[in-house]
Amino acid sequence: MKKYILDLVVSQNTRLHANYVLIKMTHANPLPEMVPGQFAEIRIDGSNTTFLRRPISINFVDKEANEVWFLVQLVGDGTRKLATVKEGDVVNVVLPLGNGYTLPQDLTSVKPLLVGGGVGTAPMLMLGSTLAKMGCKPTFLLGARSSKDLLQLDEFQKLGDVYMTTEDGSMGEKGYVTQHSVLNDQKFDVIYTCGPKPMMMAVAKYAKANDIECEVSLENTMACGVGACLCCVENTEEGHVCVCKDGPVFNIKKLLWQI
Amino acid sequence: MADLSVNIGNLKLSNPVMTASGTFGYGKEFEDFVDLEKIGGIIVKGTTLHRREGNPYPRMAETPMGMLNAVGLQNKGVDYFISEIYPQIKDIRTNMIVNVSGSAIEDYVQTAEKINALDAIPAIELNISCPNVKQGGMAFGVTAKGASEVVKAVREVYKKTLIVKLSPNVTDITEIARAVEGAGADSVSLINTLLGMAIDAEKRRPILSTITGGMSGAAVKPIALRMVWQVSKAVKIPVIGLGGIMNWKDAVEFLLAGASAIQIGTANFIDPAITVKVSEGINDYLDRHGFTSVKDIIGGLIV
């Protein structure tokens, strides 16, 4: 897919709890085609400790409003600075980058499970929406430390069934996503996941043990975002490959995870 | 519109802007963002005789106004380059230059010999300065004797323009530059990355898998500029300047310091279209100051 460098205009920046913002951006021209699981490299202006762009996954594309959404967790100086943008500000963005999730071929008989952890729920919104539009009702399993880290629940509930876990038990079942009862009660054909690596490894282990197709989205530290610098590599059956260009979405069969 | 063309040995560049090895892939990665043919020269990823997996992850750390990398020359080897990559890039109408690295003189020689046979590759850049490989290029690049030996050996088999990339991690870079000139290099490019280190205080661990890595980005520019200035006065062959160039103004500073051409590296990560903006900016500068050719400002520093 053709990649673009665009000066996007912030149309809305909403604080979601203390540590997250949802930034919606638009452009005078129609936004380029993007698929679920892809990401953008966002330039951070005005932070003297932030030199490189920040890779942020695409949360959702609202075609009618010509908006792309980014769900951002405030982690370091770069994301904290990004979180301060206001309506009307111009943000330089390179997108769309990487490969998205593999959408199922036979939609009528497929039951997908979308597992998101923390801010890793971000790409699950666009993926769930795409699946729903294709006539394939998604089931979401969202995990977080506590209820204040479970984001955009109203959006997810519009698209499919939503199950939740929190580590402190403040919402949904207490524990980790892989301990949720829905995994015993229902059978899924494909699992898509994004979140902290230990969570994705646990999900991958469950998928492998139950012989379910599973794709994960990696977030290795990145510089260029286009496969040029070879910094964000993951070890695979084909050797070191770039998460930015060959991923960020990988089928777990390709990875050398000890699961 | 000023004349932006410059020569590096027999190599003719339409403008003095090149891309630094390891920051621009094989060029194709950036074709959505820039017209590759408007770049004076594209130096592709470091190539070695045999396939190298490079260093383990993590390989990158962001630093104030810069970054560290420890890629370790990951590439699929020169034969793969010739059979798989070369057919894809040979028709790009600019100077496609291969950066050649190795861990023994014989490796450099064999790799250079193979690339000498490729019609669409008019030059190589010999990397004797990679800080990220054990017994790697840098072992040759840090002594005048080592640098001279490897360049002499490659010069015997390589008939086209031979650029040698120098390490800044030395006591006196002019000594190495003179040795390389004496061994038959057509040009020197400098600087490669500066050896650096980053630590995660909370975890009490190094950030890079290799502990140390090569530093690049805006923060290294003053050091690079100083070294380009010193080397351009020490040798007669053209100097290619690089290190922290983020915009046209930085590029002009390197030209004034004595560089005949410049390379853009880390800045490609921040603005993938920076190369063409820099050559346009150099042109505007020349017009504004009434120069008709970029050659008029090379080494034109008023002191």
Image (cartoon, grey):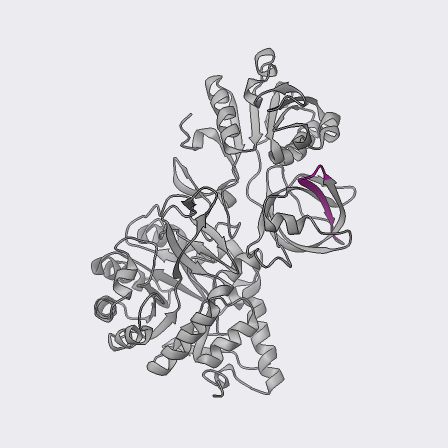
Q: Quadrant of the C terminus of chain A?
A: top left
User: Residue B288 at x, y = what percent?
Assistant: 62, 83
User: Residue B256 at x, y = what percent?
Assistant: 48, 81
Q: Is B250 contained in the magenta span?
A: no
Judge by depth and name the residue closer to the eye, A156 or A77: A77
Which secondary structure class fits the magenta region best? strand
Instruction: Tell how many labels.
Output: 0
User: Residue A130 at x, y = what percent?
Assistant: 67, 32
Q: Is A24 contained in the magenta span?
A: yes
In magenta, the rendered stretch is A16-27
Q: Is residue B25 visible?
A: no
Examine the image and state in which quarter residue B11 appears: bottom left
In the rendered structure, the answer to whether residue B268 lies left or right of residue B205 reads: right
In the rendered structure, the answer to whether residue A200 lies left or right of residue B233 reads: right
In the rendered structure, the answer to whether residue B128 lies left or right of residue A200 reads: left
Looking at the image, which residue sits at the far top?
Answer: A185
Judge by depth and name the residue closer to the eye, A123 or B1: A123
User: Which residue shows up at 61% across the image and 33% down it?
Assistant: A118
Examine the image and state in which quarter residue B131 appears: bottom left
Against B180, is B203 above or below?
above
User: Which residue shows up at 31% across the image and 52% down it?
Assistant: B79
User: Residue B242 at x, y = what percent?
Assistant: 44, 69
Against B83, is B120 above or below?
below
Q: Is residue A40 visible?
A: yes
Judge by depth and name the residue closer to the eye, A159 or B162: A159
